[in-house]
Image: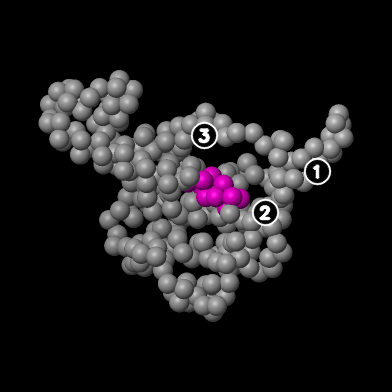
Amino acid sequence: MSGLFFARLAVLEEGTPEYSDTRNTLIEMNMSLVRYAAGRFRSRGAEQMEDIVQVGMIGLIKAIDRFELAREVEFTSFAIPYIVGEIKRFFRDTTWAVHVPRRLQEARVQLARAGEELRSRLGRTPTDKELAELMSLSEDEVREARLASNGYNSASLDAALSTSEDGETALADFIGTDDHALELVEDFHALAPMIAALDERDRKIIHMRFVDELTQAQIGEHLGVSQMHVSRLLSRCLARLREGMLTTG
């Protein structure tokens, strides 16, 4: 069903009422994806669930704006990484170390949604004035909401922790090194739907270059094109994948 609306969205002019109506319909139709993704974080508590869903909606909107029907990939597979990535970014950025008024915490979530909507509509970073008009706030309140995001959670590495065997030890003793293997697993998981969204030739080029480890010249021989053309195609593919990783990461 979503495919019909994506096909319609592709031929409508951005900024028109028809475009907005179709886009909003797609958002409403796929809200279940946000609730599904948010369910993974239910252990964070009921109080945060509303914020989680709101932030997940930002990821859904990004996915809708970036999805292309011609990629022949299910929108569900395409959207989930965007939604989960946005929620993870929310947790990374909004663990409050100092008391921040609830109204500012809520305004920060609204600010993120308004910023994404205006960037999509205007094709550039919105000004505080434009954000304030959309959010029905003053410019000072917009700036205050942005500053509120600096209230990160923190703890001293010298903080004493009780243990059953040794009595007390420092928090720093429990901190290990980064496991880069786990980071790779997350990266591969995020890349999978993006690679699937490429057309067949681009997927073949990626496979030959990074799985078969062929040179660009060898790939050109397989495809019947010049090495320079392979270089341009590969650069375009990698740029698209890099943009996707930065968006969802």
- Say which residue label 3 marks: 183
Asked if residue 179 is among those painted magenta in the image, a careful observer would answer no
Q: Which is the main secondary structure of the residues drawn in magenta?
A: helix
Q: Residues within 10 Å of mark 1 (few under 14, many from 20)?
A: few
Which amino acid, mark 2?
Asn
Q: Is residue 27 left or right of residue 97?
A: left
- Contact check, label 1 and label 3, Cβ < 8 Å: no
Q: Residue at x 42, y 72 (%)?
A: 127
Specify the quadrant of the image occupied by residue 21: bottom left
Q: CA distance from mark 1 to mark 2?
A: 17 Å
Mark 1 vs 2, N-terminal side? 2
- Say which residue label 2 marks: 153
Specify the quadrant of the image occupied by residue 95: bottom right
Foreground mark, 1 or 3, reads 1
Q: Looking at the rendered structure, which numbered label has been put on residue 160?
A: 1
Compared to 46, does 133 lie above or below? below
Task: Point out the stretch of residues depicted in magenta.
Answer: 82-92
Q: Is residue 125 left or right of residue 167?
A: left
Please provide percent x and percent y for residue 199: 28, 35
